[in-house]
Image (tube, rainbow, N blue to C red):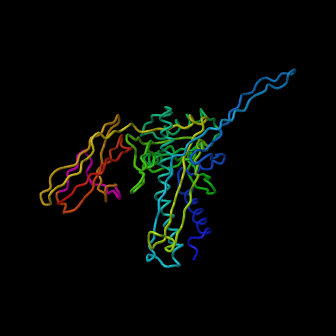
Amino acid sequence: MAINSIENVTKYSNELDRMFAQKSATGFFADNALSAKFVGAKTVIIPDVDFQGLADYDRDTGFTRGAITVSNTSYTMAMDRARSLQIDREDLTETGVANLAGKILGEYVRTKVVPECDAYVLSKLGGLAVSRSNTYEGDAEYPLEALFALINKVQSVVGYDEELVAFVDSYMFAALQNSTEISRIISVTDFKQGDVYLKLKSINGVTIIPVVSERMKTSYKFNPDGAGGFIPGENAREIYMMVCPKRGAHLVKKTENMRIFTPEQNLDADAYKFDYRIYYDVFVNKSSLDSIWAWVSPAVTITSQPESVTVTEGSITGSLSVAAESDGAITYQWYSCDNANGSYPVKIKKAITSTFTIPTDLTAGTYHYFVKVFVDGCAGMNSAVATVTVV
């Protein structure tokens, strides 16, 4: 068996990279990073080229000399993320290692790595658009009008021959699908991402990339340890739509590899061990800073979080409550979940106010609840998870 061989490591790495390209909404930005050059552990240099315009030709002196300015801008990479996974020797047979390992690692990239990378890239680009006031305030009832407005904003900067992409969150993508006008102008196009061609919808040559709303916020907190993962940042806003040139950003991945160890090599456990690491960041050239435009939700702030409580079985009373502020119209939806991380949420029927009455029929145990605060019926922000302990 060669589970720890270089050949298998390379094979798995290539397959995971291909899966990243297939599943990631932002993976195509990596195609723009070919000219990036690393200098040191965290610094990458990306050239930004600028030219002088044409001048008159003089029949006596000839050409007017012009300059080409190449600005080698240094950027510092921030995202160095990793995780070690183990499969106990007894959980699989000798012949099943390679097959199961491929499935597990592939599922890990699909469910954990891709969502986090997309969330980071989109939040950084959306945050850039907000910071430079490159935003458009649309009407949720007319999403197609908003999309065209954003496309026009970008085209006024980069011209009309540049390939554009539009990231659309799940709420607005559904609204677009229901638009009566869109059926006449939408088409299916081949979209190249790495060495993978994806079938995506496009409008007037602009590729539409639908993204789940959980990855379309203006900021996130990326947990450094423990359960890891990411959650929306404080006062994060929903990115309804964002339009930019396909080559408008550089997704640089310095390290995306793994180490594989057999139980004999693993000093910590009688298990197969898989160490996965990805070191990456996304950068925008100075010349492209104003080519990214977004429509973001009104800001929503949760001013009071639901608090954990202890109640007595058979005589349960009390409630959980939240307070929030926004310039938009606020609505609520409460959820139950499996743990304090908010895993596997289940919508609670008719729990749509700022206050949730604790069910009186709970038996002894621990229960977890949180509320999603919506603004204008579209964007949402989750509250903290409150624990109800029944004794």
Residue 345 on the magenta span = yes
Q: Position of residue 134 (x, y in %)?
A: 51, 33
Q: Is residue 198 left or right of residue 223?
A: right
Number of marks present in the image shown:
0
Q: Residue at x 35, y 41 (%)?
A: 375
Q: Is residue 324 above or below residue 389?
A: above
Q: Where 71 falls versus 93 (above or below)? A: above
The percent coordinates of residue 234 (x first, y second) are 37, 42
Residue 23: in magenta span: no
Residue 92, horizontal then vertical, whole percent? 47, 76
Q: Nearer the viewer, residue 202 or 366?
A: 366
Image quadrant where residue 256 sits: bottom right
Location of residue 206 in the rendering, given as x and y in whole percent from the top left corner: 58, 44
In the image, 118 versus 182, the foreground residue is 118
As drawn, the residue found furthest toward the left would be: 315
Residue in view at x 51 percent, y 64 percent: 106
* Quarter of the figure that contains the C terminus: bottom left
Dominant secondary structure, magenta? loop
Q: Quadrant of the N terminus?
A: bottom right
Q: Residue furthest right?
A: 60
The region drawn magenta spans 342-359
Q: Residue furthest front?
A: 267
180 or 44, nearer to the observer: 44
- Picture quarter containing residue 91? bottom left
